[in-house]
Image (cartoon, rainbow, N blue to C red):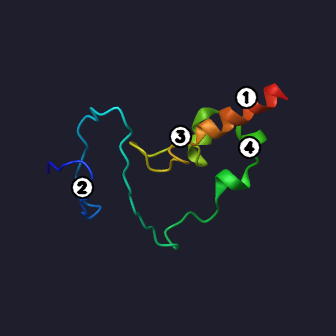
Amino acid sequence: MTMPSGSLAIAKGTLWHRGGANLSDRPRLIVTPQYCAGWVRQLENMSLAIPAELAKKLPERARELIGYSIHPPFMGHVDGVHPKRLLQAQAIGQQKC
């Protein structure tokens, strides 16, 4: 669908979709209300159960398996950022101390 600036479209989450190029000089805002039933969770939250200091020392694949990864294109992000960046940011912060 093509819509003028400021329009709103509501669709089921099963709709395959994409956005066209943002040709403006301003960021595009999107609201994506999503819901996951509380019981559809892992038994143990491994990315919180393993201290970040230890997780940083694990092989990349092990970090992916405990939650420091995403399902492309973006499922599992933290504030719009790949979760492995949390470990990288923490390491940079410790170097500055």
The residue where tag 4 is placed is 52
Front residue of this view, candidates 29 and 96: 29
User: How far apart are labels 2 and 3 at the CA level?
Assistant: 29 Å
- Alpha-carbon distance for marks 4 and 1? 13 Å
Judge from the rendering whether residue 68 lies leftward or rightward of residue 92; answer left or right. Answer: left
N-terminal of the two: label 4 or label 2? 2
Marked residue nearer the N-terminal end (4 or 1): 4
User: Label 2: few (<14), some or many (≥20) within 10 Å?
Assistant: few
Task: Report the disc number at residue 82.
Answer: 3
Which residue lies at the image location 53% right of the left edge and 43% below the top edge? Answer: 69
Identify the residue under disc 1.
92
Q: Looking at the image, is mark 2 or mark 3 earlier in the sequence?
A: 2
Label 2 or label 1, whichever comes before in sequence order: 2
The image position of residue 23, as x and y in percent, is 27, 32
How much space separates mark 2 and mark 1, taking CA atoms?
A: 41 Å
**Image location (x, y in percent) of residue 43:** 60, 66
Q: Amino acid at mark 1?
A: Ile
Q: Are marks 4 and 3 in contact (CB under 8 Å)?
A: no
Q: Residues within 10 Å of mark 4 (few under 14, many from 20)?
A: some
Q: Quadrant of residue 15?
A: bottom left
Q: Amino acid at mark 3?
A: His
Question: Of residues 57 and 72, which is closer to you in this image?
Answer: 72
Q: Which residue is mark 2?
A: 7
Residue occupying image coordinates x 49% and y 69%: 40
What's the CA distance linking mark 4 and mark 3?
15 Å
